[in-house]
Amino acid sequence: MKAFIQYILIGFLCAQTTMAADYKLLKPAQILDVETGELMSGQAVLVSGNKIMAIGPESDLRQNHNIAMEEFEIIDLDGLTLMPGLIDAHSHILLHPYNETSWNDQVLLESRAERVARGVNHLKATLDAGFTSLRDLGSEGAGYADVGLKRTLKKGIIPGPRLIVAGPAIVATGSYGPKGFDLAHNLNLGAEPADGNDLIRVTRDQMGKGADIVKVYADYRWGPHGGAQPTFSLDELKLIVETANSSGREVVVHSATAEGMRRATLAGVQSIEHGDFGTREIFELMRDHNVVFCPTLAVTEANAEYAGWKKGEDQMPASVARKHAAMTSAIEAGVIICNGSDVGPYTHGTNLRELKLLNEYGLSMLKTIQAATIVAADLMNQQEPLGQVKTGYLADLIAVDGNPLEDLDVLSGPQMIMIDGEIYRAP
Ligand SMILES: [Zn+2]
């Protein structure tokens, strides 16, 4: 009998400890509804495990869920705005800024160990900046190091954002770099070449090796005069999309030319990255096919600055002027615009730069915030809903001081960061 009582007691205590560690009650001054742009005050958020379990007045949450006072971990967010963690839908965690080391030298001279070590730092810098998810679009010569980093992260060995990764990415034979070296050298390429029917095998192989999403270059700077020209035919792109889709994965396309964008759209890809030469007509086609546009403005400005452009002083270079034209056409066409910055060529952790540029180039404040939450969350292809402070959603949350719809700068350096239900930065 004594042993039985002891057993019950231990069982009860264990249950108590698990429960106490499991419920977190976040008490912000207000919650930003990124769908409507409304701020809700007087609401608390109950997090259980890695999900938002309920939202409502604190007393209601306690009563309705029948949880004793001591079982909550209270997270006081006095004066702060709670909102979903930010998402950058186009990153390269295995690259670092080109004004430090050129892309060629990163791909050809840096050891895999160095690139991974840098990647670990980049992941931490990203989460420190309140970006709780990245769609990482190509390891750029580092094979499947992105898959390895994602698995390491999941084990809790290193800190970083939620990741979906593309592995090496697929390019048409002859199109991608490094280029211009003596042909006697067998160089490490920045992506994996494949063509024709072999695209089926390579797409499957990349997915089998851990690619969550298939990244394809529909054009590249391989024209006779160095300009961007299409690579894969429409039929080749269709093969890739059909192969990826039948495994439950999506295809994301790098494309700067109108023709590359047209083929990618007709092939059924999920999103198009860059779109520098996109026309009104192409953006309307994308809109009609529900293809999302990630304009990658920050990387274009960064590259222009590396080439000597002084923003605000010098005349706009052609590359930046083209981005303005593309954004104007895209906004007028009503295509869905996503926050994807192509961070890596510029400093990891400064991802906010893209949001500010989206707004500067004409996107409304609300749509800019949505581009980095609701829209980008869709591209993360998670099993559970992500990107909003709503019941049932994954608990990736940040708390900031102010209203980001009035000033995007309040998003820099959040006061609290929660990822997958765990506090990363306490207020
Ligand atoms: Zn990129």
Image: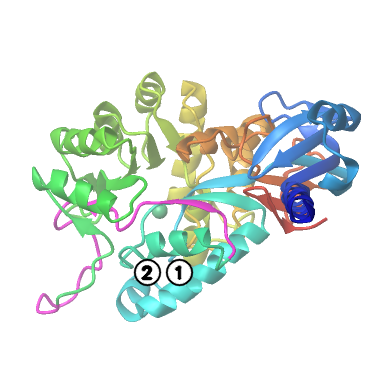
Crowding at mark 2 (Cα within 10 Å: few <14, some 14-19, many 20+): many
**Magenta part of the protein: which range?**
159-185
Observer-nearest of 147 and 277: 147
Q: Vertically, is 117 above or below 213?
A: below
Q: Vertically, is 280 above or below 354?
A: above
Q: Residue at x 25, y 46 (%)?
A: 219
Q: Quadrant of the C terminus?
A: bottom right
Observer-nearest of 11 and 49: 11
Verify CB contact (< 8 Å) between mark 2 and mark 1: yes
Residue 293 pos. (x, y %): 44, 35
Q: Vertically, is 35 above or below 216?
A: above
Q: Is residue 256 left or right of residue 31?
A: left
> From this viewpoint, which residue is outermost toward the top?
288
* Secondary structure of the residue carrying numbered label 2: helix
* Main SS of residues in magenta: loop
Residue at label 2? 103
Task: Report whether residue 278 is seen.
Answer: yes
Q: Residue at x 14, y 75 (%)?
A: 186
Q: How many marks?
A: 2
* Secondary structure of the residue carrying numbered label 1: loop
Q: Residue at x 62, y 31 (%)?
A: 367
Residue 297 pos. (x, y %): 51, 47
Q: Residue at x 52, y 38 (%)?
A: 376
Residue 113 pos. (x, y %): 40, 79
First along the sequence among labels 2 and 1: 1
Residue at label 1? 98
Residue 121 pos. (x, y %): 56, 70
Observer-nearest of 270 and 228: 270
Q: Is residue 160 magenta?
A: yes
